[in-house]
Amino acid sequence: MKENSSPAYYLLIIVVSFCAFFVNNHIVPADLMESRNLATAQEMARTGNYLIPTMNGELRLEKPPLPTWIAAGVETILPGNLNAQRCASGIAATFMVIFLYLLAVRLSGSRNIAIAAAVIFATCYNPVMMGRTASWDIYCHSFMLGAIYFLVCSISARCRGFGWMFLSGLFMGLSFLSKGPVAFYALLLPFIIAYALVVRPKMSGKGLPLVVLLATALATSLWWYGWLYFTQSETIAAAARKETTAWMSRNVKPFWYYWQFPAEAGIWALFWVTSIIYFFAKRRPGRHRRLFAFSIVWTVTSLLLLSLIPEKKTRYLLPLLVPGAVNIAMYLWNIARNPTSRADRIVFRLNGLVVSLVLLAIPVFIYVMFLGKGLMPVPLFVVIAVIFLVVTAVIVRSLVRKGSRMDIKSVFASMVVAMMALEAFCLPAVGSMFINDERHSIRNLRDDPRTEGLAFYYEADKPLRMELVYEADAFILPLDLSDSALMRKVPLVLVSQEPAELLLEGSGLTVEHLDTYDNNWRKRGHKRYNPDLVRHAAVVSLPPAEDEGGDREEDN
């Protein structure tokens, strides 16, 4: 197979990444994680306090500030634009795809293997979801993958590679400033273990460049923490203890919780499992077997290290998809280029047929769930049905060719096209299944002239969801409604679970009901519908002063 030109591959990466991370990324409103991140960025932009992040007025030092600085910059340019914030994450995800491509080229010398790995990564479920939300994970892992690429460039260079080492250290520092040691543990450490065990690089003459890497990484990583140590020493120590405790006590799952890791690859799940079995079943799995072995060791090591941490969430598996994409690419490349046994062909065809059945079922599902209920225009359904029928037909035709001449390239391309079609055409319809069409966001208070210049408060003895703070773009501070301090704080905006008229009945204060807001993006009746996201808002003020002259005239 002829190696194609690099510019064409970069264009392919951009097109696939555009569909994966940018198209329809506005469908779902901000969840709790995004709201916490973006509320911090909003306060940064609103107050101009960039060095000491706060969330609803309270210090938030548990998370390093680099992604928040980026989000604050976006907030300054495009205030309140969730789509723009998610596009910033999409740019980071796109760079991660590019770094994976460059790393795979450097390790394999094959642009075909590298582009396959990059495109597979960009169409896996976990990277797609992380790249289209305002999550800080995508930043730390993107910077770290860049650092790994520059590290490999330096190690494989004939010269001492000071420039590459400097860039590697810089990107490691940027990763640390994005989410602390997360990517060092989940991405860098398993890479180093696999690289040392399988590749066994020659490090002669690299001692001084490694010193440059470490010095650059430490300087970039720790300057902000050093500044906090001298200005907020007790607070930063408490934040570090809190975050460490959270790793051990929050969202604790058993060691085997990540056994379902292939599901994070989405459409590639079966091929990922098969790629691992294929490697161990074949004593010599064709050319580039060292790269295949390296990617397998990297995958297994990463999975084991992630499983050792008590706190577990499926989104933490994002770094596992980096070697995972290489696993799948190597399997497809070996099946396409090397002689295959009858068992290999049967397994590949079974995988492809299962995928084709799923793709064939998508138009049927859309017809039943959306078109039949009038939730989708007929022309759009026709486009979707035609795309998936054609893709399915191409896959089946490629699989049933006589003998061992399966068209692997067509199967691969069809699966990529299917994912792009899902992202471009199906996400709005799928979103309508879950999005609360009665959602009435507290964001509307931003433009209400009755709240201009007033402070926002909530009942101190009731919980406050950070989604409300983000949507309102204001501090919403706790207030004891039974305290005499209430009288000194009026006029104010009260955001409460019960109507303010009931809470302040008999207080002598004037209550002007503004509206009732439901910030749930899940529909009523859904198990994740949260009553804490339903709030009443009212302006509370002193009663108007009586006209003394009018009182005297009335007395006379």
Image (tube, rainbow, N blue to C red):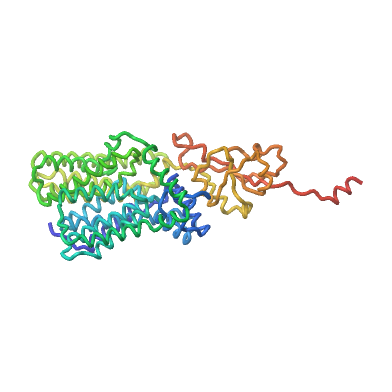
Q: Position of residue 43 (x, y in %)?
A: 50, 54
In which quadrant of the rendered view does residue 214 lie? bottom left
Residue nearer the viewer, 33 or 210? 210
> Would residue 120 appear left or right of 130 to someone viewing this image?
left
Is residue 11 or residue 437 the one in the foreground? 11
Q: Is residue 506 left or right of residue 94?
A: right
| Total count of labels | 0
**Residue 428 visible in the snapshot:** yes
Residue 226 to residue 398: above or below = below
Place residue 512 in its image quadrant. top right
Q: Position of residue 39 (x, y in %)?
A: 48, 51
The answer to whether residue 308 is left or right of residue 135 is left
Check the image and report above or below for 10 versus 56.
below
Give the image location of residue 235, x and y in percent: 47, 49
Q: Residue furthest right?
A: 556
The N terminus, quarter of image: bottom left
Residue 91: in sight, yes or no? no
Tell me: residue 521, above or below residue 178.
above
